[in-house]
Image: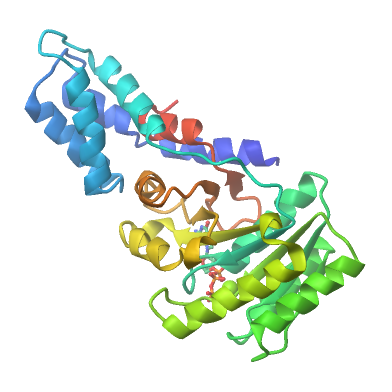
C-alpha cells in the first residue's frame, strides 16, 4: 500500500465525524448569521482541540466577514471557515535533511515512528540508516534493532547507559564511511521540564551538528495527539533554543481531531511534517494542511 493511499484511508475514517456534518446539522441548512451560531461554532472548534485562543481568533475573523445584511448559507460558512483555518497555518519549506532526530516525552511514539519513517523513505527509493541513541530505557535499542533487521538496514546501537552523544557521533561517522541518503536517530523519552535531560538533548544536537552540519538536520518533536492542549506545554519545553524544526503528530487514529496542529503552529511557527495514525508500519503520511482541514471541516 502506498502512503498516499493509506493517508486517504485515514482521511476516510475521519469523514464520519466531520465538523461540517455537525455545523450543517447545527445550522439546519438554513441561512443564518447570529451570535448564537458563532458561539456554537466556537465550541465545535474547541472540541476539535483547536484551542480556545486560536478558535476565538478564527471565529472572530469569520464573524467579521459576515455582515448583517449577508445571510450566508451553512455551506458558505463551512467553506469560509475552512479557508480561514488553512490561512492560519504557516508552512516552512521542507529541508532535504541528511539526518532526522526524533525527540519527545516518554511514550509519544518516537521509536515506532522511526520504523515507519524508515519504511516510508525506503519505499521512496532512498537509502536509510538508523542510530539507536536511546541508551536509557532497557530494551529501547533492541526495539529499533529488530525493525532495522526487518527492513534490512543498518542500525548503529549504543550500549545501555552509554553517553547518547557519543552514540550519535559514532553513528554519524559510521554513515560517513557507509553513506546513506537519510539517517534517522532515536533518542530517549524525557519530560520537557527536566532541565538536566533537556541539556543532555541540546548537547546531543550540538555534537551531531558538528558531524553533519546543522543545516542538514531536522529535529522533530513527536507529539501524542491524544493529549490535546498539553501539547502546547510540551512544544514550549522542546523548542531547544530554536533547534526544533518541526512536529510529528502521532496517534491520530485515536479520539483526537488533531486541531492542536493549528494551535501549536500558530504559537511556535512549527510546521507539522508527518502524522501517524495506527500501529501498522504503513500508518504514516506527510502532513498536508489543505487535505487535513478540508477533511476536518468539510469531510472532503
Ligand atoms: N494507535 C497508535 N499507537 C501508536 C502510534 N504511534 C505509536 N503508538 C504506540 O504508542 C506506544 C509508544 O510508542 P513508542 O514508539 O515506543 O514511543 P517512544 O516515544 O519511543 O517511547 P519511549 O522510548 O519510552 O520514550 C506503543 O505502544 C506504540 O505502538 C499511532 O500512530 N497510533
Ligand atoms: Mg522509544
- The x and y percentages for residue 51 are 27, 48
Residue 249 at x, y percent in the picture: 49, 53
Q: Which residue is painted at 85% across and 63% down in the image? A: 152
Q: Give the side of residue 182 with respect to residue 114, left or right.
A: right
Is 113 placed above or below 34 here?
below
Q: How is the image coloured?
A: rainbow
Residue nearer the viewer, 38 or 183 = 183
Task: Name the residue at the bottom extreme.
Answer: 161
Q: Exactly how many numbered labels are in the figure?
A: 0
In percent of the image, x 84 and y 58: which residue is there? 180
Residue 179 drawn at (x, y percent) = 88, 61
The quadrant the N terminus occupies is top right
Using residue 99 as the reference point, say whether residue 249 is left or right of it: left
Residue 44 visible in the shown view: no
- The quadrant in which residue 71 appears is top left
Where, quadrant-wise, is the C terminus in this rendering?
Answer: top left
**Residue at x 14% of width, y 14% of height:** 67
Can you see residue 18? yes
Q: Position of residue 40 (x, y in %)?
A: 15, 34
Q: Is residue 150 left or right of residue 57?
A: right
What is the residue that sits farthest to the top in this orientation?
Answer: 69
Q: Nearer the viewer, residue 73 or 57?
A: 57
Above-or-below relation of 234 to 117 = below
* Residue found at x 73% / y 72%: 131
Where 110 sits versus 294, above or below? below
Q: Of residues 40 and 9, which is closer to you in this image?
A: 40
Write down the quadrant of residue 9 in the picture: top right
Amino acid at each position: 500500500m502506498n502512503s498516499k493511499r493509506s493517508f486517504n484511508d485515514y482521511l476516510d475514517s475521519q469523514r464520519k465525524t466531520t465538523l461540517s456534518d455537525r455545523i450543517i446539522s447545527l445550522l439546519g441548512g438554513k441561512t443564518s448569521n447570529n451570535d448564537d451560531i458563532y458561539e456554537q461554532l466556537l465550541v465545535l472548534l474547541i472540541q476539535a482541540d483547536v484551542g480556545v485562543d486560536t478558535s476565538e481568533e478564527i471565529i472572530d475573523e469569520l464573524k467579521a466577514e459576515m455582515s448583517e445584511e449577508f445571510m450566508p448559507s451553512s455551506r458558505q460558512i463551512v467553506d469560509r471557515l475552512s479557508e480561514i483555518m488553512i490561512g492560519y497555518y504557516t508552512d516552512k519549506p521542507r529541508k532535504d535533511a541528511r539526518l532526522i532526530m526524533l525527540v519527545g516525552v516518554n511514550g509519544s511514539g518516537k521509536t515506532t515512528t522511526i520504523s515507519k519513517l524508515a519504511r516510508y523513505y525506503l519505499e521512496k527509493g532512498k537509502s536509510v540508516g538508523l542510530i539507536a541513541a536511546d541508551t536509557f530505557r532497557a530494551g529501547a535499542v533492541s526495539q529499533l534493532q529488530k525493525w532495522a533487521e526487518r527492513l534490512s538496514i543498518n542500525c548503529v546501537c549504543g550500549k545501555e547507559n552509554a553517553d547518547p552523544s557519543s552514540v550519535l557521533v559514532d553513528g554519524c561517522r559510521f554513515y560517513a564511511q557507509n553513506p546513506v541518503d537519510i539517517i534517522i536517530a532515536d533518542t530517549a523519552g524525557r519530560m520537557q521540564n527536566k532541565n538536566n535531560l533537556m541539556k543532555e538533548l541540546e548537547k546531543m544536537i550540538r555534537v551531531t551538528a558538528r558531524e553533519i552540519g546543522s543545516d542538514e538536520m531536522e529535529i522533530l518533536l513527536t507529539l501524542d495527539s491524544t493529549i490535546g492542549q498539553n501539547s502546547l506545554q510540551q512544544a514550549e519545553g522542546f523548542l531547544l533554543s530554536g533547534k526544533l524544526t518541526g512536529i510529528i503528530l502521532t496517534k491520530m487514529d485515536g479520539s483526537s481531531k488533531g486541531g492542536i496542529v493549528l494551535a501549536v503552529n500558530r504559537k511556535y511557527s512549527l510546521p507539522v511534517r508527518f502524522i501517524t495514525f495506527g500501529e501498522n508500519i504503513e500508518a504514516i503520511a506527510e502532513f498536508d494542511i489543505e487535505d487535513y482541514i478540508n477533511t476536518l471541516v468539510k469531510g472532503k
